Image: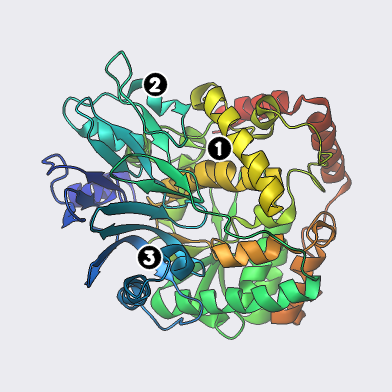
Amino acid sequence: MVADDVTAAERDRLTLIRQFILAPRPLEEFTGWHHHAAGEGFHLYAHPELPVQEIVQGRTRLTLIGYLIDPLHPERNDAEILCNIGAEVEKGGDLHDATELMGGRWILLLHRAGMHLLIPDSCGLRQAYYGRTADGKLFVASQPGLMERIPGVRVGDSLLVDRFGPEPPTILPSGEMQVFRLLPNHRLDLVSGRSIRFWPRKPFSDITREEGVARSGPIFRQELAAVVNRYDVACTLTAGFDSRIMLSALHGREKQVRFYVNRHIEHPEHYRDQVIPSQIAADLGLDFRIIDTRQPAEDWFREIFLSNCSYFIEGVGGENRAPELAAVYRSDVKDRMGVSGVVSELTRAYFYTGKSNIPYPKSITASSLEGLNVWWGKRNRVDRKDLEAWLREARTVEEQFRIPLLDLFYWEHLLGRILATMLMEYDLVSEHCAPYNNRLLLSTILQVPVRYRSHPDYQFHYRVIESLWPDLLRYPINPTNLWERLRLLGVAWATRTGTRGLGSRLFNLVNRYRY
């Protein structure tokens, strides 16, 4: 589609697509969006292509923003899943227990007498930012920039500084709204404005590799069954473990799915992510294509993309991301439910074994965490006081629940902020499903000893594929050449010596002038 073919209706459809804002009063600024009364004193405005489902059962009112996947009942739709959750809560059950197995990308609003809570999905991939106006009113939105569309509200530096924590946001002396990000594993009390940790709920204990495979394999398979039952699906297929697990979980349904891989500017003609998936697709008769992302984005597309997000993650978002999304928009995978293996890095001990080769446990400080989160740059600063407070609580969580601190950091900061933001960027071309985004699944895998989940063998992940579709192991998984092995050694050295941030800045500089 070229610029002259883009209609005003299509521009309107793509503007702020799949975003929402929850307000304490009616708003006139979001005309054309669906308006829902989300409990006493709140108004939900959702873009027409963001699904919203509401049910009332007895004293319980539940509002779903996004979609839910129930692996135990892959035939159920959102309304049926929500009714089942509402029935459990109304009988006295715990909402967190009722949603522990739920995949998808969602936010739940629970309203009962004197209680109004917002609960995010497992990794916060349907992200929520919140802030207070000068008169003390709480607003929640999929990104801070939506709040700036309300007359009289100024967000200012809150777009550039990552804030989070238990205390309610305040109004700064300058009159600007202070905006917080809701972390995964935390719920938001919409009455007090406080963020409250609700997970973990019981200590981890080691399980065997085979037990982990036996528990997690069916969840993968049933989640993918539900997604294929309900949506037209486009699934990524690369040479890596993540997409291979997705393909293995689709065994028997693979002919119902469209597969693709993006070819980036740094990929040579015979790069593994083109060659190996092409061979798999040819042998299995899959519907597969390679999307060339090396062309510049059209001006109109870039304009909408950049205006849809109030900030971008330095080095991977913004201008660097526009050509990839424009290529997907031009392809025949747009508007399908996208499926990929994102989130899986959490299960592979990324920060302290294998590729990063970080000695763990070792002294961990707020400064060292900033160094690990290589996408916290000048445009995306983290508030050091908030990070130090999070670290103090995380040490207690690690001690009481036996969850490695760096796993919790990856879960709540890299997934809950960086990946969630990247998926919001991807909303411009399609909705996305990450089957790993399931609390019971992640909790199960993280209890498998690290030696089975780490580089270079990833024995646990290998066994999951073997259990679901063993023939897929005939094809190599991420074969490396000498250059890539040297690069991984360089990453390990930079991490150990504290110079990884310098490498990240060089990477960002190169990306800035790629196109």
Measure the alpha-carbon separation of dots 1 and 3.
26 Å
Marks 1 and 3, the one that precedes in the sequence = 3
Q: Position of residue 458 (x, y in %)?
A: 80, 61
Q: Residue 466 appears in which quarter of the rendering? A: bottom right
Instruction: Specify the color scheme.
Output: rainbow
Marks 3 and 2, the one that precedes in the sequence = 3
| Residue in front for this viewpoint, 316 or 260 | 316
Q: Is residue 488 left or right of residue 464?
A: right
Mark 3 lies on residue: 67
Q: Is residue 450 left or right of residue 134?
A: right
Q: Is residue 510 left or right of residue 230?
A: right
Q: Amino acid at mark 3?
A: Tyr
How many marks do you count on the picture? Answer: 3
- Confirm whether residue 437 shows in the render: yes
- Please name which of the two marks, 1 or 2, marks the residue nearer to the observer: 2
- Confirm whether residue 469 shows in the render: no
| Residue in front for this viewpoint, 31 or 176 | 176
Residue at 35% x, 44% y is 142
Residue at 50% x, 24% y is 379
Q: Position of residue 135 (x, y in %)?
A: 19, 27
Mark 2 lies on residue: 157
The answer to whether mark 1 and mark 3 are in CB contact below 8 A is: no
Marks 1 and 2, the one that precedes in the sequence = 2
Q: Amino acid at mark 1?
A: Val
- Please name which of the two marks, 1 or 3, marks the residue nearer to the observer: 3
Q: Element type at marker 3?
A: strand
Disc sitting over residue 191 in the figure: none
Mark 1 lies on residue: 316
